[in-house]
Image (spheres, helix red, strand yellow):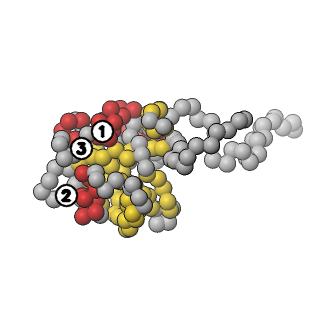
Amino acid sequence: MKKQQWKPGNMLYPLPAVLVSLGREGEKPNLITVAWTGTVCTNPPMVYISVRPERYSYSILKETKTFVINLTTEKLLKAADYCGVRSGRDVDKFKETGLTAIPGPVTGCPMVAESPVNLECKVKEVKALGSHDMFLAEVVAVHVSEDYMEGNGRFCLNQTGLVAYSHGEYFSLGKKLGTFGYSVRKPAKKKGKHRR
């Protein structure tokens, strides 16, 4: 396969496009769409979001040191796109998108009621990187929608309609191609009939 070399840039795709909710006392809650986000540690559970200092939400994040990552689904995609191109300085994003803000029981930070998964986060460190600052945070609570719970207590995350962002476009998740460790798993033995 012939290659072209380009200048250094972010070509790590696909990414989750999440709705990050936050708020400051006495002000309307706000939403910001972030694709620069991910997992950084299991124990303690840690995530990050990267935000430009000129964004309206930046000062709120720096002051409150709390936010909620709300996973985005196909049903929430139009709202997520809107929240990525409009500023909370100019509009009330919860009102304009019709989404419902509910208080996170641990942080008090607003959560999106319509999202199937909400991660309440407390910022542990802010690292200036250049165009963006990275907010490294501990996940202090996870809330999941009971609509996707099976009788055995299993949460069916992949049935929620999650979306991904790749190179300026949104995609729904496709068909399942395998499960973790499938490449080294031994084939199951067929159960045969035993003669007596």
Q: Which residue is mark 2?
A: 24
Q: CA distance from mark 3 to mark 1?
A: 7 Å
Question: 10 Å neighbourhood of mark 3: few (<14), some, or many (≥20)?
Answer: some
Q: Is 97 drawn above or below residue 68 in the view shown?
A: above
Element marked by disc 1: helix
Locate residue 49, reporting x and y percent.
40, 55
Question: 10 Å neighbourhood of mark 1: few (<14), some, or many (≥20)?
Answer: few
Q: Which residue is mark 1?
A: 85
Asked if residue 52 can be seen in this view, the reply is yes
Q: Amino acid at mark 3?
A: Ser
Mark number displayed over residue 87 = 3
Mark number displayed over residue 6 = none
Locate the C terminus by quadrant: top right
Locate residue 138, reporting x and y percent.
40, 63
What residue do we see at 18% from left, 41% from top? Answer: 91
What residue do we see at 46% from left, 62% from top? Answer: 45
Q: Amino acid at mark 2?
A: Arg
| Quadrant of the rendered image containing residue 46 | bottom left
Q: Is residue 103 left or right of residue 33?
A: left
Asked if residue 142 can be seen in this view, the reply is no
Locate residue 58, reporting x and y percent.
28, 56
Locate the N terminus by quadrant: top right
Question: 10 Å neighbourhood of mark 2: few (<14), some, or many (≥20)?
Answer: some
Q: Is residue 88 left or right of residue 13?
A: left
Foreground residue among 102 and 174: 174
Mark 2 vs mark 1: in front: 1
Q: Are marks 2 and 1 in contact (CB under 8 Å)?
A: no
Q: Amino acid at mark 1?
A: Val
Q: CA distance from mark 2 to mark 1?
A: 21 Å
What residue do we see at 31% from left, 56% from top? Answer: 53
